[in-house]
């Protein structure tokens, strides 16, 4: 079994994972604030860390991995949504939490071991804030409790930013009751019409950052193995988590490895409502993009690189997955994961390399069953080609393996004709395939094809 090597944001190095306790490998990933549908960018960390979760379970055993992903169900955005709609906060958070679970399941994500809600851990947050005050790292001011950033000398090491950079480019709230502009809120007062809890500092509610520190401690301990999330959370959220956790429990260590995925674009541009390229996960699912296709597109780019969602990529992914499902529909998975595939995945979640290895296993000219069995096992470790993800295949024609081979042969023959500049022959094959209901797509020096719902294999006879 190869070592799992992960890029640690905190050290800027790729490191071999050495769990604090191999009998209980522990991972925390920042989850959603539940006030609306999850957009496409929200899905990227879910898929990235779902693959890591699957890999850890494979290496250490499912019973030896604990994965926590929180739900933020108390937040100013939720309060604002309640005021806009007139709906109770509980109704909003319950509905959007259910939406989130359904949409992530549609993308093939396994449920985490624990999905704690912030509102269930208010006493733990209050206790941690009290400890920070007692240690001189927090102070009360006008009903608020704030963390004193200047009291933690290593603040900024995770993101690598100076204090001036952080003030200039970050979401820093300016308030007269702060001792320093960088100090951040641990507890704030609640108005009578806002959710609130009794505390030593009056009725109020927690700031955003304290919840993850309190919940990770409660469920994973004061030190655990991996903390993940999108790189937009590196500052201020993760920087603040480190400061408050390490100051509340000096010497405990908190998270050993920090992992951050890059952001998502749509058709080469930042996703934005103003550009008309803003999509929720549900938008794409309702447009009949299968969750498995969305997952494949995401995994085709390394998690530390920006990912560009394009319709072209989605079409190519759909074609590939359809062919793989057809090739493996009567194949039982192999007993073991292919070592070459596993080396890719264990090397900092190199999912593009892992997918290339799947292509290699699937391309044998004789479609050897043992290679297809290996491919199916490996794909399932990525969350692909599972029985749960196959439902969308019922919407397209089932094509037998001999017919698929026939079409593959014709596509190859057409490609060779184009290479030899026999364009008349190439065009005749293309037109015949299209007449039969084969969707032909050229991509420079390569090609893909798909089967339309009205595919008629009998029409292929005209191409003999």
Image (cartoon, helix red, strand yellow):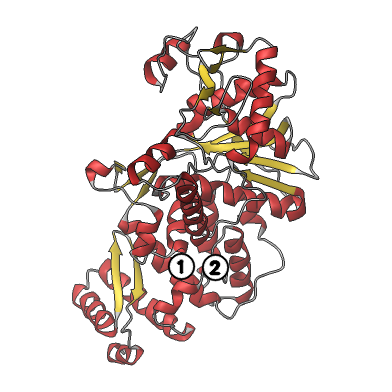
Q: Residue at x 59, y 28 (%)?
A: 210
Image quarter for residue 246?
top right
Task: Confirm or deny contact between disc 1 and disc 2 (CB under 8 A).
Answer: yes
Q: Relative to 360, say whether 165 is above or below.
A: above
- Residue located 66% across and 9% down the image: 136
Tell me the number on the disc at residue 368: none
Residue 3 % position (x, y) = 71, 43
Q: Is residue 217 found left or right of 150 in the rendered image?
A: right
Q: Earlier in the sequence, mark 1 or mark 2?
A: 1
Q: Nearer the viewer, residue 426 or 228?
A: 228
Q: Which one is in front, 174 or 458?
A: 174
Residue 14 seen in the current view: no
Residue at x 42%, y 10% (from the top left corner): 164
CA separation in Å, label 1 and label 2: 8 Å
Residue located beneath label 1 in the image: 321
Secondary structure under tag 2 reads: loop
Above or below, 417 against 261 in this view is below
Residue 313 spot, x, y in % from top left: 36, 57
Q: Around disc 2, counting alpha carbons within 10 Å, would you say few (fewer than 14), some (14 to 19), or many (20 or more)?
A: many
> Is residue 460 left or right of 4 when viewed as pictured?
left
Question: What percent of the width, then of the height, locates residue 38?
Answer: 43, 49
Q: Does 372 sit above or below residue 204? A: below
Residue under the image location 77 percent in, 44 percent down: 24
Quadrant into which the C terminus falls: bottom left
Where is residue 304 shown, x and y percent of the image? 49, 39
Would you identify the image quadrant in which residue 157 lies? top right
Q: Name the residue that disc number 2 marks.
A: 385
Say whether residue 126 is visible: yes
Q: In screen coordinates, is 78 left or right of 343? A: left
């Amino acid at each position: 079994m190869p070592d799992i090597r992960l890029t640690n944001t905190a050290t800027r190095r790729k490191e071999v994972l050495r769990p604090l306790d191999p009998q209980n490998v522990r991972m925390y990933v920042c989850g959603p604030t539940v006030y609306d549908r999850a957009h496409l960018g929200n899905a990227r960390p879910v898929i990235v860390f779902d693959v890591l979760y699957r890999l850890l379970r494979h290496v250490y055993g499912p019973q030896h991995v604990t994965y926590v992903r929180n739900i933020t169900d108390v937040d100013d955005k939720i309060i604002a949504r309640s005021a806009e709609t007139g709906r109770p906060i509980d109704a909003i958070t319950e509905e959007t939490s259910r939406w989130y679970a359904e949409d992530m399941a549609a993308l093939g994500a396994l449920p985490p071991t624990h999905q704690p809600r912030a509102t269930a851990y208010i006493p733990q947050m209050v206790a941690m804030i009290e400890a920070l005050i007692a240690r001189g790292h927090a102070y009360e001011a006008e009903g608020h409790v704030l963390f004193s950033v200047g009291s933690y000398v290593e603040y900024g090491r995770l993101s690598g930013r100076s204090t001036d950079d952080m003030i200039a480019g970050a979401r820093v709230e300016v308030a007269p009751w702060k001792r320093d502009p960088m100090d951040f809120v641990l507890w704030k007062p609640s108005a009578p019409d806002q959710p609130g809890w009794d505390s030593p500092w009056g009725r109020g509610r927690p700031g955003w950052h304290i919840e993850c520190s309190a919940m990770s401690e409660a469920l994973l301990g004061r030190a655990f193995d991996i903390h993940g999330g999108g790189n937009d959370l590196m500052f201020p959220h993760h920087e603040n988590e480190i400061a408050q956790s390490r100051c509340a429990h000096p010497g405990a260590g908190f998270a050993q490895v920090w992992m951050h995925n890059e952001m998502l674009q749509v058709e080469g541009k930042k996703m934005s409502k103003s550009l008309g390229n803003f999509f929720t996960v549900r938008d794409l699912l309702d447009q009949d993009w299968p969750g498995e296709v969305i997952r494949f597109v995401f995994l085709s780019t390394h998690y530390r690189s920006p990912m560009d969602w394009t319709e072209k990529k989605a079409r190519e992914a759909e074609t590939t997955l359809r062919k793989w499902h057809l090739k493996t529909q009567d194949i039982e998975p192999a007993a073991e994961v292919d070592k070459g595939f596993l080396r890719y995945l264990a090397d900092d979640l190199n999912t593009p390399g892992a997918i290339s290895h799947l292509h290699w296993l699937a391309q044998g000219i004789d479609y050897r069953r043992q290679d297809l069995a290996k491919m199916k096992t490996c794909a399932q470790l990525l969350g692909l080609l599972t029985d749960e993800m196959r439902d969308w295949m019922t919407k397209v024609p089932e094509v037998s393996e001999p017919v698929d081979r026939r079409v593959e042969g014709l596509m190859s023959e057409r490609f060779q004709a184009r290479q030899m500049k026999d364009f008349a022959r190439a065009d005749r094959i293309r037109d015949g395939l299209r007449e039969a209901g084969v969707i032909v797509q050229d991509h420079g020096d390569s090609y893909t094809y798909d089967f339309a719902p009205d595919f008629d294999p009998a029409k292929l006879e005209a191409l003999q």
